[in-house]
Image (cartoon, grey):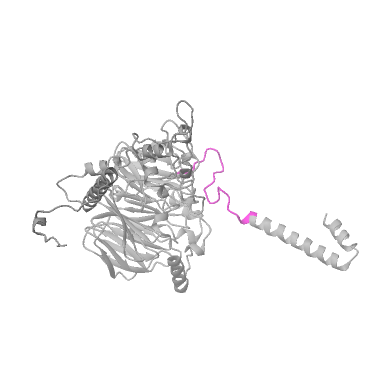
Amino acid sequence: MKQQNLHRISTSPTKNLRRSLVKTATHIAQSQALLSDAVDLLPSEESGFIQTDAPLERTWRLAQSDIVRETGAEAARGRLEMKLDGGPYRIRYTKNGRHMAIAGKTGHVASFDTLTGAIHNELQLGETCKDIVFLQDHSFYAVAQQKYTFIYDRDGVEIHKLKDHISPTRLEFLPYHWLLASVGSAGYLKYQDTSTGQLVAEHRTALGACSVLAQNPQNAVLYLGHQNGCVTLWTPNLPHPAVKVLAHLGPVASVSVDPSEGGRYMATAGKDGHVKVWDCRNWKGAVREWSLRSGGKGDAEVEWSQKGVLAVASGGSVNMYTSPSIKTVHNAPSQPPLYMTHPLPSASHRPITSLRFAPLQDILAIGHAQGTSSILVPGAGEGGMDTGEGLDLYEGVKGRREREVRALLDKVQPDLITLDPEFVGALAPPSKLTTKLPTTGGSGSSRANEVPYSRLSRAERLQVSGKADVTEEVVSDADEKDADGKGKIDREEREKRKMRGKGKSVKRYLRKQRKNVIDPTAVAIRAKLEKQKAERKAEIRRVKYGDEPQEKSSALDRFKRTSKV
């Protein structure tokens, strides 16, 4: 085929045509070569996961020592055990997964670089710490302490004391909106703008103390788990939950949202001993449900990875499940196939209080009573780094500053947080305020089909809302002839009939006003009606008797001097 093309090019009659054909053929060959390279480099759906050779082999039989032995030296560094005395611990990673922060229940707080092992700071706060979260990067992090929420810098210096966040239990940071969200024992969900320092929203959940908080990275909606078994979805612009689901028969212990498929699936664990996977698009019931492998009823933790691996911690072990088995609809509760499992060394490590997958890495960090443990989970992390999103492991100081400035300029307003983020840029639906008025055959209401409700007259608004006076007679074109069909009704008579009962709505308003309350509006309306009534009587007297309107007589008129002629 190539020889035929070259022969066809070489036998072309003109020099310019041959040059153009050579250029086109070279471009096509280069494009095909680049396309084949791209197909080879693109990650497949099953890349990174453990594959078995024989049908009877099981991946969950592999221990961490076997995985470390087969992996490279750089990946094996992720397997780490830290024995600490201030547990149990909560763990958080930065967006690029390089820096990690831990907070112990007794007040031990530390942050360090997982790539180099350098410790940024270590604090002994001397009071209960319930959660920790990084802000825009590793330069600042927030700690949910016993009474308030505090913000510290990289060196461990206290920067802010957020007194509006009282007795917080869980914290979340929305990176694209620069919002720090907290929920506490009082049952209030609060949003704090970290760029301006303003309290954006404060919602009363009315469901008691809450200790479960998670966010959907796709639309920035917050998920709360409550003591009555309900899971509620919240946005800053709604004072009530956008969605409320009865997930468990007991208190909700943990909630997590799958980032691999755009936040479509949610996993919940309850103190009733069950784990459920939900489809957030229809909420028609749990997609998959199974009981905890530990067999006991108590606290459990769930966490999704970037590639859709679900980690469930209960008792003294952590179990991992992969898609699509956990996302396939099953009517009856049944255990999904197990991908990996990791038992804790001893019972003294219980309880497990935190699970966090490291972004861009196949590492799962476990927080327990004796410190933290990092295990290897092949296939859990996303392979590609997006430097524009701040996912660069080797980002320098200059790049971090430029990214922070761009993030501030591109900050998304809290009003745009909704369940369906695709509404931005879509066509607006037709206005529901443009209402067709009920007509009696005339054409007087055709204007209402073209003008919105806010531009309608007062009479048309009353007619749309059903509050118009039905006793008022409205003459249409069909009623212009009388019953005998002898011609049109006199115009003056029709005007009199049209004006009959016009003041009834005003009188009804005045009757509703309490007489013992002085309302300036009602007083002005009554004075105006009295004046119109007096003028109407004077006009009738002048037409009937030919009298001129006389001024109101007074008792002092007897002392007036009469002019002598």
Q: State the image coordinates of residue 68 (x, y, percent, origin top left).
A: 47, 55
The magenta region covers: 39-60
Q: State the image coordinates of residue 3 (x, y, percent, origin top left).
A: 85, 57
Look at the image and say whether residue 102 sits in the magenta stretch.
no
Q: Quadrant location of residue 97? A: bottom left
Labels in figure, total = 0
Q: Is the residue 363 above or below the residue 499 in the image?
A: below
Q: Quadrant location of residue 194? A: bottom left
Look at the image and say whether residue 40 sits in the magenta stretch.
yes
Which quarter of the figure is the C terminus placed in? Answer: bottom left
Which quarter of the figure is the N terminus placed in? Answer: bottom right
Q: What secondary structure prevails in the magenta region?
A: loop
Q: Is residue 431 visible?
A: yes
Residue closest to the far bottom:
398
Q: Is residue 316 visible?
A: no
Q: State the image coordinates of residue 382 (x, y, percent, origin top left).
A: 50, 55
**Which of 541 and 216 lies nearest the eye of the viewer?**
541
**Which of 97 and 534 lies nearest the eye of the viewer?**
534
Residue at 28% across / 67% down in the picture?
A: 160
Q: State the image coordinates of residue 31 (x, y, percent, origin top left).
A: 71, 59
**Which of 470 and 537 lies nearest the eye of the viewer?**
537
Residue closest to the far front:
565
Looking at the image, residue 529 sits to the left or right of residue 97; the answer is: left
Looking at the image, residue 287 sits to the left or right of residue 127; the answer is: right
